[in-house]
Amino acid sequence: MTRAWRRLGLAAALLLVGAGLAPIYVALVSSVSPEARIFAAPSLVPTAFVADHYRALFDARDFWLPIRNSLVVSGATTVLAVVAGGLCAYAIVRLRFRGKAFILAMVLAVSMFPQIAIVAPLYLVLRQVGLIDTYPGLVLPYLTFAMPLSIWLLVGFFRQLPLEIEDAALMDGATRFQALRHVVVPLALPGIAATAILTFLYCWNEFLFALSFTLGPERQTVPVAIALFRGQYQVPWGQVLAGAIVATIPVALIVLVAQRRIVQGLTAGAVKG
Amino acid sequence: MMRHRSGSPSTGSSDEARQAALFAAPALVAIAAVVAFPLVWAVWESLHRHDLRMPWLGRSFVGAANYREAFADPRFWSALGHTFGFTVGTVVLELLIGLALALALNSVRRGAGALRTAALLPWAVPTVVAALVWRFMFESPGGVVNHLLVSSGLVTSPPIWFASPWLAWVPIVLADVWKTTPFMALLLLAGLQGIDPALYQAAALDGAGPVRQMMHITLPLLRPAILAAVIFRSLDAFRVFDVVYVMTRGGPGAATEPLSLYAFSALFRDLRFGYGSAVSVIMFLVSFVLALFWLRAARYQVELS
């Protein structure tokens, strides 16, 4: 590639990435602007800085509550999905049995089907057993996408591991479970971490189930809480945007810390599949 | 030591199958319980009249009546049309911009990691947040977009985006494209990085310029990655819900209502669970057909290469 083309590439990359960051910047600047100035002519640098919207968010609206709900639900779902999904992925990669291809195809199909298709029956079941507006009432539906996602990603990561150490452990009389716990898990730890990160991200961002299976602020997750923000007369944009920024901080941190692993997980899953 | 793909030195294969069943059971039972069983239930539910506003009516079997009602409802057909239009529109835009972004990122040497992190950020933002921020930017009359349009002299009076059945699609599509293009770009970037650089060197020696290299090396070799990305994105775009719910609730009227939102309103606004289930089942079947179509396309692609 010639030098001119490389320069053009860099310019295009900066332009596109900059365009991608612009809306986040707009939201950030507006979230610290006084309400009266939010719809004034935009300027590149903030003309005023007020923490009012953030204060109102946490004092008047108790935004900690949806944050806690999101953390509990996403955390519990991630642990369940990675543990059970990990066992399943290990069996698929290392053990001989029939129907592997079928299981993998089902797992992929389940992660791509429209979730609205199971909202009605899940609602009726959860209502029957009294789990509407509870944490388990969100964790169980979340498994519909978290479980296939973690199986799919972990199969990809386990396949990259060398077999020799594990076989040596088995020769020395270790059981399958011991080999998994003491050999495979430590070796695959980076992949397991990537899987947990991606699963957590998908749970944190989920909206449809959280909207359908909660009744009020008590159990609402962060996306539902900000989507349903209402002021007395109009949308309280300052607080909405402050909420949007707060909801973005954890995922932004995750991306900053684990960009490489996320990309690995996403591309390993999609391109090879 | 001999390298074998599976099978342990000490146990027989029936033992192994039993072990596999044990290991796989928790995950598979969970998927069966939260996906397979509800799907079957949804089909059963769709054959009944089940109105939660009138519980005293109970749940009576009505056969295909809910499906007939859906097929006779013009709002159902326009929701189906909106869903397809949204899917085609967003996936085409994402593919074009994603390809540009992937090519650009691929040409960067220094600071590539930082750029990739920044490029990935919109993808990680919750869809609800993306929708709210874009709605804010398109608010009338004082949103950022209208300010820019007026001050650059492109329009004299700023449009009221969310009041127009056509213009309301602009922020919806842009928000979705903004959020999902990074995913597309990363898949394509992985494909680009898998192309042997020697091919380009050989082509350059033969006097092929960048455009010819693009047409004869990059695009053909990128085809599997493009296909995979388009399959993932189109199935995902087909179930669009969050963006529209937050931005317009399907309005003005039902001008931006996709199928998932139509089904959702039947379920949770009208509380008609039989009818809502019928619409959901139709949507599931359509996306199933779409997946089969893509599988055929993928197989055809494999045969070609």
Image: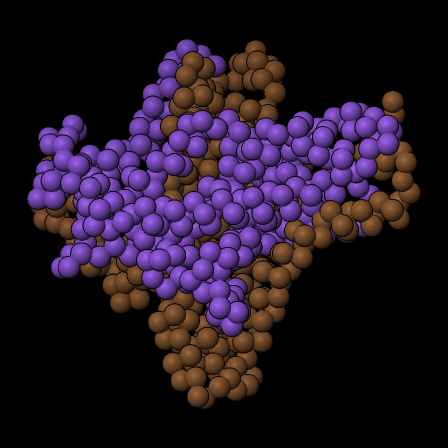
Chain colours: A purple, B brown
Residue B271: x and y in percent read: 40, 75
Tell me the quarter of the image containing the C terminus of chain B. Answer: top right
Residue B77: x and y in percent read: 41, 69
Residue A194: x and y in percent read: 55, 33
Residue B145 visible: no
* A243 sits left or right of B16 in the view: left
Q: How many marks?
A: 0
* B290 sits left or right of A17 in the view: right
Residue depicted at x 38% and y 36%: A250
Residue depicted at x 53% and y 44%: A78
* A85 sits left or right of B105 in the view: right
Residue depicted at x 41% and y 53%: A207
Rendered position, B59 above or below A157: below
Residue depicted at x 85% and y 37%: B7
Tell me the quarter of the image containing the N terminus of chain B. Answer: top right
Q: Which residue is more in the foreground, B232 or B47?
A: B47
Q: Identify the image quadrant of residue B52.
A: bottom left
Furthest toward the bottom, the residue is B57
Q: Which residue is more in the foreground, B203 or A127?
A: A127
Residue A158 visible: yes
Rendered position, B65 above or below B212: below
Residue A2: x and y in percent read: 44, 12
Rendered position, A253 above or below B262: above
